[in-house]
Image: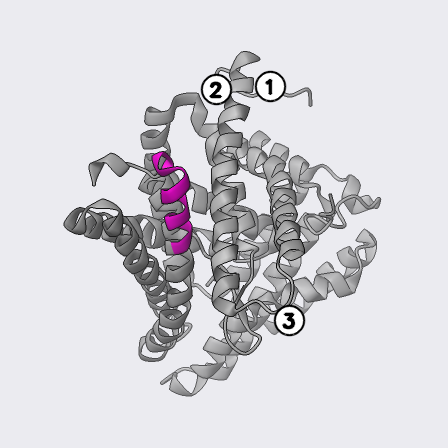
């Protein structure tokens, strides 16, 4: 889902850069207001954690494997603003060091995965968590949000490709959404298991748990 | 510790490796903008761009097979766009497709050249001097520093799991154990971040990192 360079036209990647940079600026102000100096080491180590977590390969079917994307997981554990920053940092490193996602497309990739994926996913999670309440609400919210965030982010990606004139919407949207509806199931399963584990061992580390 | 896969060939010694990283960053970014913004049918300039990159590759001593493997990452998107060729009305789908393919290939080639001739800490330093917000640079330096520590931790846990699970393990159990490993990794990373922060505070950290270079 990391869009490479050349796939987006200027009318798409330039606005996406502007939105992502200003969005990240806002997130940084929110997070550093709450955490002060502690933000820098915490965000850095958490970005490394998401990166390492993405390296774990899970068996799927018939020899294929998939891995965690971690947008909703980061947002559930760290909160929507810190989660978005962490994912953006991971994407930047992937773009610079691993050529996973292009430089001009980085703004769009951050928009899709930090803002639509992690932050949008957090909103879904928060609604469900508040509606059901208690630990069940946290787990159910994580499951639905993890699945929805993957599908939503890939759909937005399809829309961006369509705006760029790279791929028509009536093909790109169903193709991306259908594939990611399957990928989303894996994402939901892993996210729920990880959040469940943290709930059992260090429930105090889950963001805003008392609110529920 | 065995993680040579991140900026693997950045430690080589060549003319390109010795250049000021700022120059390399600026040239690479301009190159990518030029490629992305050019007309999709400007085949002559694409050929010249490609030739320039090939010359740089030869000068840099980076193995060409490594760069070639890195550039294969575009395939899933290429497949999607290839599928949409027949659906393009009024436009030449095939020309669009080849244009996109060449552009993304050249850009990835260029980025690979940048990162395999520049060590990551030097790349960050260059970006800092070029006025990228220091908070991002600091977070990225921390991430780079602790990534290897966490990957080691994760390998240790995998080894512990492998040495305890003999014989056939069901798929569901594998998924559960792997998820628990991620959970443990999160708790340990969080605690590590707190320890790092406390030790930084005790050394006088006030939101700014000072380095010698």
Q: Secondary structure at mark 2?
A: loop
In the depicted view, which residue is nearer to us: B146 or A4? Answer: B146
> Which tag, 1 or 3, sits closer to the chain's start?
3
As measured in the structure, the alpha-carbon distance from the residue carrying label 1 to the one carrying label 3 is 47 Å
Of labels 1 and 3, the one closer to you = 1
Q: Secondary structure at mark 3?
A: helix
Residue drawn where x is 47% and y is 56% of the image:
A105
- In the picture of the structure, the residue carrying the numbered disc 3 is B44
Of labels 2 and 3, the one closer to you = 2
- In the picture of the structure, the residue carrying the numbered disc 1 is B210
Q: Chain of mark 1?
A: B
Colouring mode (rainbow / by chain / secondary structure / one colour): one colour
Q: Is residue B149 left or right of residue A124?
A: right
- In the picture of the structure, the residue carrying the numbered disc 2 is B207
Q: Secondary structure at mark 1?
A: loop
Question: What stretch of residues is rendered in magenta?
Answer: A193-205
Give the quadrant of the C terminus of chain A: top left
């Amino acid at each position: 889902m990391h869009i490479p360079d050349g796939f987006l036209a200027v009318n798409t990647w330039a606005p996406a850069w502007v939105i992502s940079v200003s969005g990240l600026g806002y997130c940084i102000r929110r997070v550093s207001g709450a955490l002060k100096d502690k933000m820098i080491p915490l965000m850095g180590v958490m970005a490394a954690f998401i990166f390492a977590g993405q390296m774990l390969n899970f068996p799927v079917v018939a020899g294929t494997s998939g891995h965690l994307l971690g947008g909703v997981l980061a947002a559930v554990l760290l909160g929507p603003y810190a989660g978005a920053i962490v994912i953006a940092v991971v994407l930047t490193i992937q773009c610079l060091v691993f050529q996973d996602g292009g430089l001009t497309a980085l703004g769009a990739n951050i928009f899709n995965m930090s803002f639509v994926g992690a932050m949008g996913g957090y909103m879904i999670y928060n609604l469900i968590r508040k509606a059901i309440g208690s630990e069940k609400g946290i787990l159910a919210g994580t499951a639905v949000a993890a699945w929805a965030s993957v599908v939503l982010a890939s759909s937005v990606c399809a829309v961006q490709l369509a705006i760029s004139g790279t791929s028509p919407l009536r093909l790109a949207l169903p193709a991306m959404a259908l594939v990611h509806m399957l990928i989303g199931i894996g994402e939901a399963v892993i996210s729920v298991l990880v959040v469940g584990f943290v709930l059992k061992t260090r429930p105090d580390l889950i963001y805003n748990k008392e609110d529920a | 510790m065995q993680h040579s896969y991140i900026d693997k060939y950045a430690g080589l010694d060549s003319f390109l490796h010795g250049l000021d990283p700022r120059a390399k960053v600026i040239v690479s970014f301009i190159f990518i903008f030029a490629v992305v913004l050019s007309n999709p049918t400007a085949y002559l300039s694409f050929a010249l761009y490609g030739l320039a990159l090939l010359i740089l590759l030869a000068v840099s001593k980076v193995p060409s097979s490594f760069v070639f493997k890195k550039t294969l990452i575009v395939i899933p998107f290429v497949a999607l766009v290839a599928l949409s060729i027949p659906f393009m009305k009024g436009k030449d789908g095939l020309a669009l497709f080849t244009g996109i393919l060449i552009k993304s290939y050249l850009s990835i080639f260029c980025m690979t050249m940048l990162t395999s001739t520049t060590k990551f800490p030097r790349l960050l330093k260059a970006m800092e001097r070029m006025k990228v917000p220091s908070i991002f640079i600091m977070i990225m330096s921390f991430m780079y520093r602790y990534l290897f520590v966490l990957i080691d931790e994760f390998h240790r846990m995998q080894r512990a799991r492998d040495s305890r699970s003999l014989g056939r393990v069901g798929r569901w159990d594998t998924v559960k154990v792997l998820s628990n490993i991620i959970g443990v990794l999160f708790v340990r990373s969080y605690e590590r971040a707190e320890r790092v922060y406390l030790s930084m505070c005790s050394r006088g950290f006030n939101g700014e990192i000072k380095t010698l270079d």
